[in-house]
Image (tube, grey):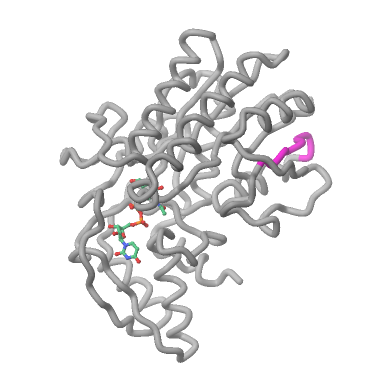
């Protein structure tokens, strides 16, 4: 049976890896829906079974138009402003993308003629906030402390509630710190590893560069390689027994910023000069996950931090 699959944010970092994996099954037709605000057209695989629709999830009109042209078997909603810091600086603008858009999509899905096999929403570890109990399990207290975390939590509640109220087949993925090829390092809000990899590569070429740490460098994160995230997303979509529940997607490994700097230095045999700035507003000191719940449905990370970083650094 041929499946038509929607990936919002499919031209972005995580979305484009997902599209690649989905398109490799030739019984799938993949529709990438993206406004190219941070996503890039070059990220979309040039394959016959992948189509690009330029549109904005914030626009109810664009969503209505999309659903008038296609009926979807699976929907992965990944389009978002991915930066916690950007949400702190622009709460209203990020709210429209990270929250309102989710309801537009859920409404369109609810009223499409054919029942969707699964609507998977990309949420975030940011929902857990700064409450100090670790590792984070799906039963941990949820207490978001930034507009980003609040919108992700509100969105996931909507998604799960649509499952309960209207019988929509839904699942929620809580991403921890995702990294890998195509993560864009060029904004001040970019993921820490994309910036660190860029700095490392410059140093490796003999250019001057410096990595800036916000805070003391002892903050802990659970960095998960993008291919493992794709593995987790596809499991949530295809396992029929998953209904209206949230799952952590992470590596289950924890590293400080200082540790990842040391790993980069070892891989590339360089010395990375550091400077220290103030801790960012809304920054969480320690965040790492238990992956037991998703492990029970077959998830197994394939990349350690070092293996993922090596693959990332070889890219280009
Ligand atoms: C990440 C995700 C976010 C959300 C969250 C879940 C990104 C860009 N953001 O936010 O979407 O899912 O995890 O909790 O992936 N840092 C530096 N120097 C730099 C950049 C960052 O020291 O040049 C620090 C930063 O202050 C923070 C840590 O590195 O303590 C990670 O920062 P981040 O922006 O990569 O990700 P985070 O955890 O804020």
Residue most toward the right? 48
Find ligand 1 in the image and state its quadrant.
Answer: bottom left
**Quarter of the figure with residue 193:** bottom left
Residue 262 higher or lower than 51, as above or below: below
Residue 45 higher or lower than 104, as above or below: below
Nearest the eye: 221 or 71: 71
Nearest the eye: 108 or 201: 108
Majority secondary structure of magenta residues: strand
Residue most toward the bottom? 206
Residue most toward the left? 132
Residue span colored magenta = 26-33
Query: In the drawing, does residue 83 fall left or right of residue 289?
Result: right
- Asked if residue 59 is among those painted magenta in the image, a careful observer would answer no
Measured from the top left, where is residue 223 in percent x and y?
37, 54
The residue lying at 55 percent from left, 18 percent from top is: 169
Measured from the top left, where is residue 130 in percent x and y?
20, 42
Q: Quadrant of the N terminus?
A: top right
Measured from the top left, where is residue 229 in percent x and y?
49, 45
Measured from the top left, where is residue 122 in percent x and y?
48, 36
The residue lying at 33 percent from left, 75 percent from top is: 211
Nearest the eye: 105 or 288: 105
The residue lying at 46 percent from left, 19 percent from top is: 244
- Asked if residue 27 is among those painted magenta in the image, a careful observer would answer yes
Question: How many circles with numbers are drawn on the protein?
Answer: 0
Q: Quadrant of the C terminus?
A: bottom right
């Amino acid at each position: 049976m041929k499946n038509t699959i929607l990936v919002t944010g499919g031209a972005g970092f995580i979305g484009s890896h997902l599209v690649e994996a989905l398109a490799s099954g030739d019984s799938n037709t993949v529709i990438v829906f993206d406004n190219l605000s941070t996503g890039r057209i070059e990220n979309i695989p040039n394959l016959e079974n992948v189509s690009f629709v330029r549109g904005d999830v914030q626009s109810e009109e664009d969503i209505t138009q999309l659903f008038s042209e296609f009926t979807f078997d699976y929907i992965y909603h990944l389009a978002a402003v991915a930066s916690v810091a950007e949400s702190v600086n622009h709460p209203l603008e990020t709210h429209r993308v990270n929250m309102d858009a989710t309801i537009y999509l859920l409404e369109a899905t609810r009223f499409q003629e054919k029942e969707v096999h699964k609507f998977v929403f990309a949420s975030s570890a940011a929902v857990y906030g700064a409450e100090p109990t670790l590792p984070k399990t799906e039963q941990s207290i949820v207490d978001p402390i930034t507009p980003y975390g609040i919108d992700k939590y509100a969105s996931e509640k909507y998604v799960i509630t649509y499952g309960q109220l209207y019988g929509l087949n839904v699942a929620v993925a809580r991403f921890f710190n995702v990294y890998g090829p195509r993560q864009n390092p060029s904004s001040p809000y970019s993921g820490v590893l994309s910036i660190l990899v860029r700095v490392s590569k410059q140093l490796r070429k003999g250019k001057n560069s410096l990595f800036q740490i916000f805070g003391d460098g002892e903050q802990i994160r659970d960095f998960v390689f993008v291919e493992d995230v794709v593995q987790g997303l596809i499991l949530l979509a295809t396992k029929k027994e998953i209904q209206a529940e949230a799952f952590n997607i992470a590596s289950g490994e924890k590293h400080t910023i200082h540790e990842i700097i040391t790993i980069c230095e070892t891989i590339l045999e360089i010395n990375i000069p550091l400077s220290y700035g103030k801790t960012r507003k809304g920054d969480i000191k320690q965040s790492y996950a238990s992956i037991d719940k998703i492990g029970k449905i077959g998830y197994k990370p394939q990349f350690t931090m070092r293996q993922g970083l090596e693959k990332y650094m070889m890219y280009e």
